[in-house]
Image (cartoon, rainbow, N blue to C red):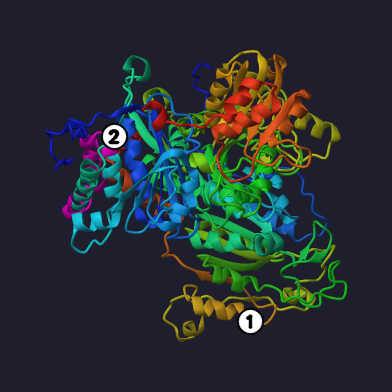
Amino acid sequence: MSATALAPSPSAPAPALTKKVLTADHPTWCPGCGDFAVLASFYRVLEKLNYPHEKIVTFAGIGCSSRFPYFVNTHGGHFIHGRALPFAAGISLGNEDLHVFVFGGDGDGFSIGGNHLVHTARKNPRMTYVIMDNSVYGLTKKQTSPTSPIGFKSKTDPWGAIDQPINPMRTLLNSGATFVARSHATQVNHMTEMMLRAARHDGFSVVEILSECVEFFEGAFDAAIPRKGGAWKLVDEKKNDGTPEDEARHDVTDEVAAFKLAQQAWPGSFGVFYENKTRKTKNALEAELVAKTRERTKNASDLALLQASFARLR
Amino acid sequence: MVSANTPETPGGAGNPTATPRSIHDVVIRLAGNSQDGIQSIGGFLARLAGRSDQDIMTYMTIPSTISGGPSIFQVRMGTGEILSAGDRADMLVAFYQHSYEAHIGSLRPGGVLLYDADHVKPTSDDNRFTQVAVPITTGTVEAVGGTSKDKGKNIYVMGVIARIFDLDVAKLGALIKERFGGKNEDIVRNALLAFDAGYAWPQNNLRDLFYRFEAIDHAIVTSGRPQVTLDGNTALAYGLLAGGVRHGAGYPITPWSSIMETLRTELPKYGGLFVQCEDEIAAISTAIGFSYTGNLAITGSSGPGLSLKMEALGWATMAEMPLIVVNVQRGGPSTGMPTNVEQSDLLQAIYGSHGDVPRVVLAPKNVEDCFYIAIEATRLAREYSTPVLILTDMALSSRIEAFDEPELPKLMVSPKADLSDRGADFKPYPLDRITRHAPAGSKVLSGKYPTVTGLEHDELGHPTGSPALHTKMTAKRREKIKALAASLPAPELTGDTAGDVLLVTWGSTWGPGREAIGRVRATGVKAGHLHIRHIHPLPNGLDDTFARYKKIVVAEINDEGLYGFGQLTMMLRARYANPAIVSITKTDGLTFKVSEIVAGIAARVQSSALDATLNAAGLSVLAQKS
């Protein structure tokens, strides 16, 4: 190709990301599914963040919500059930420049992938994990999920669920995730704000979004929908304005206070429960390790390094 | 007094009147407890052999308990090519009564039993062996003195061995200094004192027991490159480094762990990264995540761990992701015999996982090959955008061999993720070409970004339920592996190129197989040896090779199964529908003895000469050559 004046220079600003650019396959979700709103909200988040298009990665495990990456035109994919987090950790650690988003459901995150959640949080790689919690297995058509409330009638518990459900917020806080927030699929502005803050957090950030399955658990989250008689209660975050009323507000860096929020009676509060800005990411810690090691080996070439290893075995 | 530190006694020929008897090779089995440091005697002897143009092969067992417990190290060293660790020992060094009792059966009649007189009381009327009582414990304590108790017994024994086999004490002394040089001077001095005391003991007590290895023909043997001495797991890890692997993830399991330990330590030097994960599944998932960013990654495990990785491995096949998976086989099923060898993961490696998963399985034949096969695996994974499994085993993982230092400048691969722009016509899964992924981070000029997926998909990676497309995509995944098969070199064939019997081996059975076929041919039987490194897909043309022999005997360390055939044998019979293909299998957790393979062939081939050989005594090195 010959160089022409018309060819865009590499430094020209990329066109802004718009919903049109970001839209891919038509969602396969049922009409009325809460996940549509999460998707719409995610488009807005990406529009606002306006990262270079090729540096965004959208990944997922298995479940209704995990179809997400097909509907977003970014690099991305659809992995096996429950294992999207370790996969995404590989992406995040494999290329520092990427912005990694993982979507999944309550079965993916709290059941089959429960241990990965704990250990990804422990390692704190830079990425954002959105759990679309519908409290039921939808893709397999109504079995009890780890967040189904006691008494919920499913095909595996026709007489009503008997096992204690997981408290997602408590589980997430306990895992050591460095950003934990909660939202509701009927609140698009709030979801957008939560996902934006999560994306901007330097570390492993998790947003749990209550997203109703209209087919198999209708009305699951009505208790937090005002027009259905519920209560929409926001976390009142500390503003650090020195006023007396600020004393009573929630300090997002206070882990104990966050646990107290997580203990509130259903439907509880929505917002940022916890944020830890001091813990280093695995990305940073590994980079430090590399830098220190490279300094010790005086930035020797790959060939020189391996030659030295063999020389020690003579 | 003869001393390693006295330069005027080079070669240690301390007694000018004693004449060493010439031997070709020797098998020494050291049996003690794991804390006695007998592995390090093996390590010293191996490195000495590597520096002396002698060939060596070691065999090590480590107990699965954390510390303590019996442990053995068998070293075979000699002139020329050493192919197996030796069927029976020419010398047994027994540190304890239990060592004596457990291993006296491994000593050939006429061999030398050398035992610690302070701990062992051998059956005194047993005159099958030359019994030599050495005060190993008191000798060490006297030599070293102070508070170190009997620490250094291993070095004392090495001194004894050095004198008996006329080893190069100057080189051994240098090795001791290198090994302990990082520690304080007392330790080096104590080690040298123990060595000297051990060396002096046979000098003063055992003048008849004096051997020297045959002179070596340098024109034939040396490559001009120095010899390096290492175990199979280290060789494999270094091969991955040479092949440009800079990312990986794993979970500890014996005997795979030392590969991940090496990579975790080495990779940061190369700007890379190895992640220790919470489990086997997370490990393979993280590794595939690395590969997705354009950095070919490695994960690995041993038998049970490989089973846990199978679902994700199925995904990598479906999504056509390059990946290296190492499986260090051990005795199975389940926890089985975790510190023993077996070749029973072959079918799992090829067919494990669900659905139709054509994949690539390679198996190294010796320690040196662990290095080269790792490089080959990285090339194949990249070229064909596919997972590649390396099936090594417990025996290869821990045994030490010496080989020519690799020509690294010719072998090193530069590992840059290809994040260049992809054209407007980019498709991750083109039906007419091999998949070349656009790693996350690369710009796609059409503005249409690809998805990688485990769902059946169209050329752009979007899900499809189309029956026609599933057929086409299944064929796409199959055909690329067939193309890979067509690119493979013919396997190594030695001995007669046609005749009575063809011995087929894979993995670490190469060495004993090759030695066995030499013995079979010496009886006049027309026999060849085919060694298969590319287990799946098989190289083309094997049917023609098989057709030239009356019997094809496959030796493998696994069970004959419900239908009477080992795992590779089953594959070969299914592939070539040749009823002349039969098995020699075994499940004792040990590597093949040469004599077991010879006997297996004899049982399947009519030859009175071969039968007569079998009836004769086994390997008899010290006595025969004297």
Magenta highlight: main SS: helix
Q: Quadrant of the C terminus of chain A?
A: top left
Q: Are marks 2 and 1 on the same chain?
A: no
| A307 relative to A157 in the view: left or right | left
In the image, the segment drawn in magenta is B163-189
Judging from the image, what secondary structure is the residue with disc 1 in?
loop
Residue located beneath label 2 in the image: B210
Residue located beneath label 1 in the image: A264
| Alpha carbons under labels 2 and 1: distance apart | 84 Å
**Residue A119 at least partly seen:** yes
| Residue at x 20% of width, y 53% of height | B190
Give the chain of mark 1: A
Instruction: Examine the image and state in which quarter residue B464 appears.
Output: top right
- Counting from the top left corner in percent of width and height, residue B53 is at 33, 26
| Residue at x 29% of width, y 38% of height | B164
- Counting from the top left corner in percent of width and height, residue A169 is at 61, 72
Instruction: Examine the image and state in which quarter residue B228 appears.
Output: top left
Residue B53 is a magenta residue: no
Q: Nearer the viewer, residue B221 or B194?
A: B194
- Placement of B196 over or under B120, stated as above or below: above
